Image (cartoon, rainbow, N blue to C red):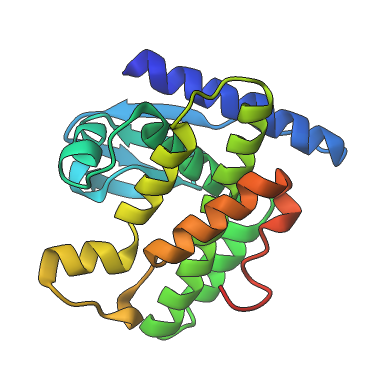
Amino acid sequence: MHRFVAVVLAETEDVWNGLFARQGADYEEPRLVLFAGSVSSACGFASAAAGPFYCPGDRRVYLDLAFFDELASRFRAAGDFAQAYVVAHEVGHHVQNLTGILPRFNAMRRELAPAEANALSVRVELQADCFAGVWAHHTARNGLLEAGDIDEALNAATQIGDDTLQRRSQGYVVPDSFNHGTSAQRRRWFARGLKAGDPAACDTFGGDV
């Protein structure tokens, strides 16, 4: 699993180095931290219950490999490309950090009411899904995908949508508490990035999501 995650991260580096270079910019590659149980980061202490996350303070992607077992057993999203989608989503947050989106979001969030902050968080998360789709587009063009890979990613996006998770855990949904987006939204924005292959198609801040 360690080798698999390293390979996926390297593939994201190839894609984002190329996309940044087209804009005359340099892509600073993120660091990967694998942990078990709990970990300390520049963003504070986190347990495995938090799931994979990106910390803008140290520009690192944190992954508890046990999460991938949960992805298949608890979240019903099996498959290696479902796992790759998770990695690519966190790398999408790194891209947001490099382009100034995450710093602006974090500054604004401190001034917002909880429901407004959650709504803005949804837009941030959906853009990271779209960026994961952009990566998948270029990975497919490079001939690295197998039959069924995209379906695995779309299923993962569905299974970890806020509405699906809440319905599964508590039997009802609370839209004001959503902070990652519904299953339909996550599928839609991943698919948009996949189709376009262009980060410019991932403007989740310009209108309805």
Q: Nearer the viewer, residue 158 or 100?
A: 158
Task: Work out whether 86 lies above or below 140.
Answer: below
Task: Please state which of residues 73 and 53 is positioned toward the viewer in this rendering.
Answer: 73
Position of the N terminus by quadrant? top left
**Residue lying at 25% horizontally and 46% vertically, measured from the top left:** 46
Residue depicted at x 40% and y 51%: 157
Q: Determine the residue positioned at 41% across, 75% down.
A: 118
Q: Is residue 52 above or below residue 167?
A: above
Can residue 199 be seen?
yes
Quadrant of residue 82 within the rendered picture: top left
- Residue for point 53% across, 60% down: 188
Left or right of 32? Residue 14 is: right
Q: Where does the C terminus fall, quadrant-wise? A: bottom right
- Quadrant of res 69: top left
Who is closer to the viewer here, 138 or 150? 150
Q: Position of residue 64 (x, y in %)?
A: 27, 33
Name the residue nearer the viewer: 206 or 56: 206
Residue 8 image offset from top left, x and y in percent = 49, 24
Residue 163's spot in the image, x, y percent? 29, 69
Q: Is residue 95 visible?
A: no
15 displayed left or right of 117? right
Reply above or below: 46 against 38.
below
